[in-house]
Amino acid sequence: MQRILFIFVVALCFYQAKGQSDSQISKAYQIFETRGEVYFRFSYPLEGRKSPVLKQISIDKLENGMVYAYANRKEFETIMNQVNGLEMLTAPSLLTEPVMAKNLKEVQAWNVYPTYDHYVAMMDSFVNAHPTLCRKEVIGTTVNGRQLLVLKISDNVTQRESEPEFLYTSTMHGDELTGAILTLRLVDYLLTNYGTNPEVTALVDSTEIWINPLANPDGTYFLGNNTVSGAIRYNGNYVDLNRNFPDTQNGDHPDGNAWQPETMAWMDFLSQHTFVMSANFHGGAEVMNYPWDKFTQLHADDDWFQLVSREFVDTIHVFNSTGYMTDLENGITNGNAWYEIDGGRQDYETYFHHGREITIEISNDKNPPANQLPDFWNWNYRSLINYVKQVNYGIHGIVTDSVTGEPLRAYIEVLQHDIDSSQIYSDLPHGNYYRLIKEGTYNLRFSSPEYITKIISGVHVTDFETTYLDVQLVKAIQGVSSGSLNKVGVFPNPSDGHITITTGNLLSCRYEILSLEGNVIASGNSDKGEEFQVDITGFTSGVYLVKVLNKNGIAYSKVVKTNH
């Protein structure tokens, strides 16, 4: 009898659970009729982070043993019968009615949300009011034809200067709006304080700052251009843009979707620039999320990422002691340690473009009441400025041809340090490079096609300071490189002592003997006519370059030094 009762209770519980699940699935299909995405939660899988379910949906957060997530119809149907405790939730953008601006002047009070037309007008107004400091680019259009707008702020805004490029972008999830307002206000702050605020002036003079406040306007204005009420996470095709980028392990389309118009616009824009440092703003949590999101192993510059993340949140804590920006490790986290994602923008920029990008989860409430927006600015604006300032620290320099001074695109490695695409490149047309790195002493290797690789040892870096290191690379050629100077000859070659350098009918010249790393080992002048001798007895064995130059040009040869 007891066994029969037990079986009855188990069966009853099963059918009740199934009934509840069926009810929630029915609710989901009702939502899909009008929104294209659902917001829901379910019990954390017993398999933990290895559960395939977690990769088939768009995770919003993990909290109290529950997974909060979004899904389009296809994604939801993949997992709806695989999870326990399924519960449909009201989308965050439908919990309260946002206060919308009635005109552009109200937007500039920063305590209302702009309509789409106000947003575009405000971006134009920045350019019109500050044409020498601000320039607008339309980098693409969305699924529904809205513009993807980016502003450049610099003291010489029409030029590509020898300065680091920095990028802030926000709201690629259309219902996460705090960052959009903060970045709009940051643009205004930088432009209106230039020339009067020394900190802002120095920052704009030394940096090319790019700001995109709204990366997914179709999601933000899902119900129309006049309201952010009902905003959705996904884009106009109901695709999560932060799962749609090429992935380091799962290929070009890790989410199984074609690249979206917004994704392609960003991929093209990022390929045209060398952003040394960047951040993208999200909402739903309060934490600095640094790379990697995909890899379990740490980034080569994990300690640097922790430094700048900690600076950001610690500055906030000075001005807000009420628990804001304290999630996870008191406001910072390694992305993968939180939860793993494929196809994210942060890892795409950091890995494929050798950048340094952080995801800033800026508010627990994705679209806080509009009258709270000024508070978020007051808590964050110092950190926003400090974060940009970090791009001007570390190791900076220019890589050029040792003879012509021509700028070079060089591959720059920190030896015994760089892994997983943490190496960087110098940028053309100026040959400038910026290696952000934690305090320490490092050995750097510079290489460029057709040039001799150069290693510079003992480069010291101090946090919050700049180490300047210009580098000249020697072209790895023999014979005449310019002018009418005759080809140089060297004999005996190999040699264990003196060498004779022949220069044809040259009457006077300068010579240099260089290591393959480009270091000058010996040098001098000669006016002895067609040939002269140089003593290399004290050189260690190896290959050396012989460089001869005068007003008519420059020529090279090689010599092999041997031991007795």
Image (spheres, helix red, strand yellow):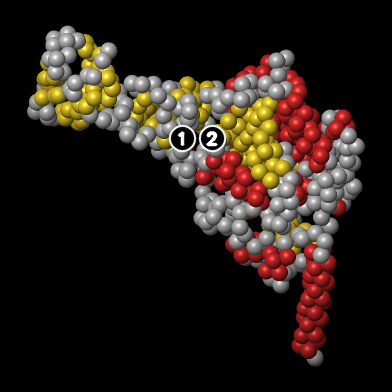
The Cα atoms of the two marked residues, 1 and 2, are separated by 9 Å
Which residue is painted at 64% across and 38% down in the image? 279
Lateral position of residue 493 relative to residue 65, left or right:
left
Q: The residue under label 1 is which amino acid type?
A: Tyr
Q: Is residue 480 visible?
A: yes
Q: Is mark 1 on a helix, strand or loop?
A: strand
Residue 446 image-quadrant placement: top left
- Residue position marked by numbered label 1 in the rendering: 425
Percent across and percent down for residue 490 are: 14, 24
Q: The residue under label 2 is which amino acid type?
A: Thr
Which residue is painted at 65% across and 50% down in the image? 261
Which of the two residues, 114 or 166, is positioned nearer the viewer here? Answer: 114
Lateral position of residue 86 relative to residue 243, left or right:
right
Which of the two residues, 552 or 114, is positioned nearer the viewer here? Answer: 552
- Confirm or deny contact between disc 1 and disc 2 (CB under 8 A): yes
Which of the two discs, 1 and 2, labels the residue nearer the N terminus? 2
Which residue is painted at 51% across and 40% down in the image? 354
Q: What element carries label 2?
A: loop
Which residue is painted at 27% across and 25% down in the image? 481
Question: With respect to residue 430, does 227 lie above or below?
Answer: below
Residue 564 image-quadrant placement: top left
Which of the two residues, 128 or 180, is positioned nearer the viewer here? Answer: 128
Percent across and percent down for residue 119 are: 79, 37
- Residue position marked by numbered label 2 in the rendering: 274
Furthest-front residue in this view? 484
Q: For the N terminus, give its image quadrant.
A: bottom right
Percent across and percent down for residue 384 are: 69, 31
Question: With respect to residue 478, does 421 lie above or below?
Answer: below
Furthest-bottom residue in this view? 1
Furthest-top residue in this view? 527
